[in-house]
């Protein structure tokens, strides 16, 4: 057995709980989005596999879910290491991901948008240089016409600390 050297190791931090989820139903009204209802924050764990539903999305209305979680900057990050956010499978599609109110975009590593559960894909975002000591992560999802139920984070959300190549 060949021992792993530090350059080949990756460290994963699971962002399982606590999360706050805000559910919203939005009506399409002459190209504008008008909120029909917004629920109080619900404390959830991720993966969030609860199957609550109040009907399918359609051409006249869509469902949104916003997940929020606070976390500290991982300690011990050294010069040359990268921090990636990995978002697992979702029901619906990802509208936006924000860290500390700034939108982040995907790393081009061959991973697809993990929309619609069952595809087994994940989305990876490079957070290197974007983290403060205290951080807030926000993931906004929206229902799609082919999704069953409300949008949900049904896969894990992780931080990965990697050596740069």
Image (cartoon, grey):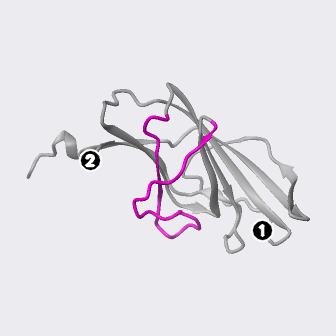
Q: Nearer the viewer, residue 129 or 42?
A: 129
Residue 160 position by quadrant: top left
| Residue 23 spot, x, y in % from top left | 75, 50
Q: Please identify the residue farthest to the left as the structure is shown.
A: 1
Asked if the residue under mark 2 is in contact with the one under mark 1, i.e. CB atoms within 8 Å, the reply is no
Identify the secondary structure beneath mark 1. Answer: loop
Could you tell which of marks 1 and 2 lies nearer the N-terminus? 1
| Residue 12 spot, x, y in % from top left | 37, 43
Residue 147 position by quadrant: bottom right
Q: How far is mark 1 from mark 2, CA to CA?
A: 43 Å
| Residue 110 covered by magenta stretch | yes
Magenta residues: mostly which secondary structure?
Answer: loop
Q: Nearer the viewer, residue 4 or 55?
A: 4
Above/below status of 71 relative to 93? above
Tag count in the figure? 2
Disc number lying in front (1 or 2): 2
Where does label 1 land, which residue?
57
Where does label 2 land, which residue?
165
| Residue 86 spot, x, y in % from top left | 46, 50
Q: At 36% from the left edge and 41% from the top edge, which residue is drawn? A: 82
Q: Please identify the residue farthest to the top as the structure is shown.
A: 133
Q: Nearer the viewer, residue 93 or 32?
A: 32
Q: At 59% from the left edge and 53% from the top edge, which residue is drawn? A: 48
């Amino acid at each position: 057995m060949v021992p792993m050297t530090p350059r080949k190791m990756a460290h994963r931090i699971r962002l399982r709980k606590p999360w706050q989820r805000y559910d919203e139903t939005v009506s399409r009204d002459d190209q504008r989005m008008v909120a029909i209802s917004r629920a109080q924050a619900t404390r959830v764990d991720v993966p969030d596999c609860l199957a609550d539903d109040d009907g399918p999305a359609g051409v006249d209305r869509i469902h949104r879910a916003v997940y929020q979680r606070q976390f500290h900057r991982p300690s011990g990050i050294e010069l040359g290491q990268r921090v990636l956010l990995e978002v697992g499978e979702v029901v619906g599609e990802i509208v936006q991901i924000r860290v500390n109110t700034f939108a982040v975009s995907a790393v081009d590593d061959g991973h697809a948008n993990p929309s619609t559960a069952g595809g087994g894909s994940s989305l990876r975002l490079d957070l290197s240089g974007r983290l403060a000591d205290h951080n807030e992560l926000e993931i906004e999802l929206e229902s799609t016409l082919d999704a069953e139920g409300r949008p949900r984070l049904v896969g894990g959300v992780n931080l990965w600390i990697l050596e740069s190549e």
